Image: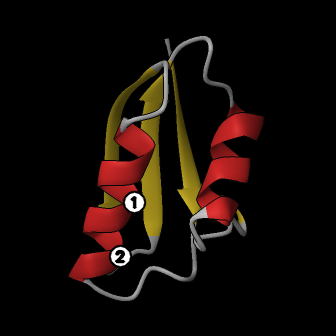
Amino acid sequence: MATVKFAVPNISCGHCVKTIQTEVAELAGVQTVSADAATKVVEITFELPADEERLRTFLAEINYPVAGFAL
């Protein structure tokens, strides 16, 4: 299992947080998802078949493109 933190500048409100958490959680291999509007960070714990590239692509597809990794 792996965990990644992405910086996602388009997160602006609670609706954004809920959308990201609901949509990403449905991807195969995703274990947990948390998003924070204040820090604009999405943290995802996952295993195969999910991978970082698939997660980045999916976030872009739902209009929350990743700007890079968050610390």
Is residue 7 toward the left or the right of residue 52 in the image?
Answer: left
Residues under numbered marks 2 and 1 in contact, where contact means CB atoms less than 8 Å apart: yes
What's the coloring here?
secondary structure
Q: Residue at x 66, y 62 (%)?
A: 61
Residue 17 position in % (x across, y down)? 31, 68
Residue beneath disc 2: 16
**Amino acid type at mark 2:** Cys
Residue beneath disc 1: 20
Q: Residue at x 61, y 23 (%)?
A: 50
Residue 31, above or below 62: above
Other-residue count near label 1 (Cα within 10 Å), few / some / many at <14 / 14–19 / ≥20: many
**Amino acid type at mark 1:** Ile
Residue 6 position in % (x across, y down)? 58, 55
Q: Residue at x 45, y 74 (%)?
A: 40
Residue 11, above or below 2: below
Residue 69 position in % (x across, y down)? 67, 55
Observer-nearest residue: 69 or 56? 56
